Amino acid sequence: MLKRLIIASAIVIAIPAASWAGIGDIRLESKIASMKKAGVGPVVFPHDRHEKSIKCAECHPKIFKDKRGANDISMKFNMEGKFCGSPNCHNSPRTFPLYQCASCHTGVGAAK
Ligand code: HEC
Ligand code: HEC
């Protein structure tokens, strides 16, 4: 893991600052069937916005593996204080709370 982090940092440093555009949005929809039942749509995670205000190491690898689809994120885990609901994240005064479904899920309140 440490070795991977060092390699990842080396890559980031090797890219000239001007061309580092960040990772952009990541669609999280592994649990799409349950989301549909609950009347919410996929989560669009704005990776770039999080990169701007939070250090990579605050999330990787402690809270999220830095590989798309490698984290089994669910609302149960979020509410237990893991992943998005980790202390100091969407479970704290630092930012909006977990009950604001529409701030993370698309299609909230949309016709099914
Ligand atoms: C707020 C937490 C957070 C921060 C800060 C953060 N990331 Fe991520 N990152 C994530 C999440 C969540 C994913 C998606 C994981 C998934 O799909 O299961 C991700 C995915 C990734 C991926 C995989 C992308 C892909 O297309 O497979 C890489 C690489 C990555 N992050 C690197 C970084 C780097 C470098 C930084 C700092 C510049 C950073 N992350 C900052 C949460 C974060
Ligand atoms: C901080 C962001 C965030 C908020 C706020 C949020 N969710 Fe989620 N939710 C997620 C993520 C991330 C997943 C997992 C996505 C995936 O990989 O499928 C998820 C998954 C789900 C799922 C799939 C089944 C499950 O149990 O995990 C349902 C249903 C769901 N959310 C409903 C809600 C409802 C209802 C609310 C409001 C009360 C809400 N979510 C608020 C981020 C959020």
Image (cartoon, rainbow, N blue to C red):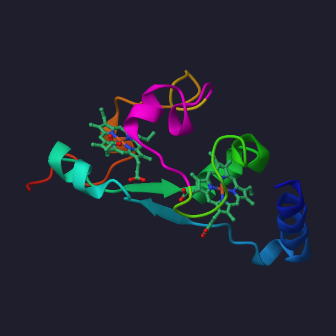
Note whether 41 is above or below 58 in the view shown. Answer: below
In the displayed structure image, the side of residue 4 where residue 112 appears, left or right:
left
Seen from the viewer's position, the closer of residues 37 and 96 is 37
Seen from the viewer's position, the closer of residues 25 and 30 is 30
- Magenta stretch encompasses residue 86: yes
Q: Residue 72 at what x, y percent from top left?
A: 49, 49
> How many numbered badges does the structure rendering display?
0
Note whether 85 is above or below 103 in the view shown. Answer: above
Q: Residue 13 at what x, y percent from top left?
A: 90, 69
Q: Residue at x 50, y 63 (%)?
A: 26
Q: Residue 39 at what x, y percent from top left?
A: 17, 46
**Which residues, given as a range, are shown in magenta?**
71-88
Q: Residue furthest top?
A: 93
Seen from the viewer's position, the closer of residues 59 and 95 is 59
Note whether 106 is above or below 98 in the view shown. Answer: below
Q: Residue at x 72, y 49 (%)?
A: 60
Quarter of the image with the N terminus in it: bottom right
Q: Residue at x 84, y 69 (%)?
A: 12
- Magenta stretch encompasses residue 23: no
Ligand 2 rendered quadrant: top left
Quarter of the image with the C terminus in it: bottom left
In the displayed structure image, the side of residue 30 where residue 24 appears, left or right:
right
Q: Residue at x 63, y 67 (%)?
A: 23
Q: Residue 27 at what x, y percent from top left?
A: 44, 62
In the displayed structure image, the side of residue 46 where residue 4 appears, left or right:
right
Note whether 46 is above or below 88 in the view shown. Answer: below
Whether residue 97 can be seen here: no
Whether residue 70 can be seen here: yes
Q: Residue furthest left?
A: 111
In the displayed structure image, the side of residue 4 where residue 49 appears, left or right:
left
